[in-house]
Image (cartoon, rainbow, N blue to C red):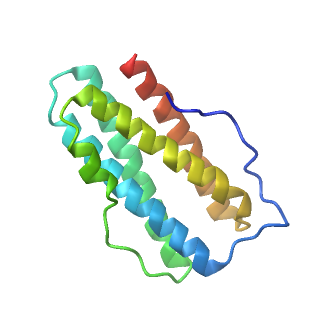
Amino acid sequence: MTDIAEADISPHEDSPIGTAELIDLLNELLEAERAGAKVALESGRQTRDVALVELLRGIYEDEARWCAMLLRQIRVLGGVVSPRIGAFHAKAMAIENLKDRLVFLNRGQGWVVRKLRELTPRVHDPALHADLAHMLSSHVANITLANSAIA
């Protein structure tokens, strides 16, 4: 299970983030989202369990949506978009048991939640802050759904 306790993600005046660091962190999240999307897509193709297919399809669509948002925001900031897929993909796909892989995928979602909780309060651009806050709440929801499927 992943800890999804609420945290204050409102902008704080004492800790703004520089553009270069922000672009690096957004690219790190993008690579992770690509990996998660690919794991969800490939895992969904490996089961006939309709409920699990629907869960994985929802996670895939969510991850793809956040990839698009991160791409857009990196470009708005004038950054170079990373072409990589996070190492998480290979690690997850090495797990043969689908339930165990879903547990691992959920841990990856938890990693994104932690990163977003650290990053979001430092983002002062209202549009990017709103996007990241929405991405955070979406990941928390996906963790809850996956926890229910795993139980």
Give residue 15's position: percent from left, percent from top. Answer: 78, 67
Query: Which is more toward the observer, 111 or 43?
Result: 111
Quadrant in the rendering for residue 67: bottom left
Location of the C terminus (image quadrant): top left
In the picture shown, does residue 83 fall above or below 45?
Answer: below
Q: Which of the two residues, 47 or 104, is positioned nearer the viewer here?
A: 104
Where residue 128 appears, as percent x and y from the top left, is 62, 63
Is residue 17 toward the left or the right of residue 13 in the image? left
Residue lying at the far top in this picture: please name it: 151
Location of residue 126 (image quadrant): bottom right
The single residue placed furthest to the right in the displayed view is 13
Image coordinates for residue 109, horizontal then vertical, percent? 46, 43
Measuring from the top left, give residue 14's x and y in whole percent.
Answer: 85, 67
- Name above or below for residue 106 compared with residue 93: above
Residue pictured at 54% horizontal, 74% vertical: 23
Is residue 112 or residue 11 the one in the foreground?
A: 112
Q: How many marks?
A: 0
In the rendered view, tell whether residue 129 sits above or below residue 23.
above
Residue at 44% in and 81% down: 80
Which residue is drawn at the image coordinates 52% and 73% (left, top)? Answer: 24
Question: Is 142 on the left-hand or right-hand side of 56?
Answer: right
- The residue shown at (50%, 47%) is 111
Is 99 located above or below residue 22 in the figure? above
Viewer-proximal residue, 70 or 112? 112
Q: Quadrant of the rendered structure where residue 20 is?
A: bottom right
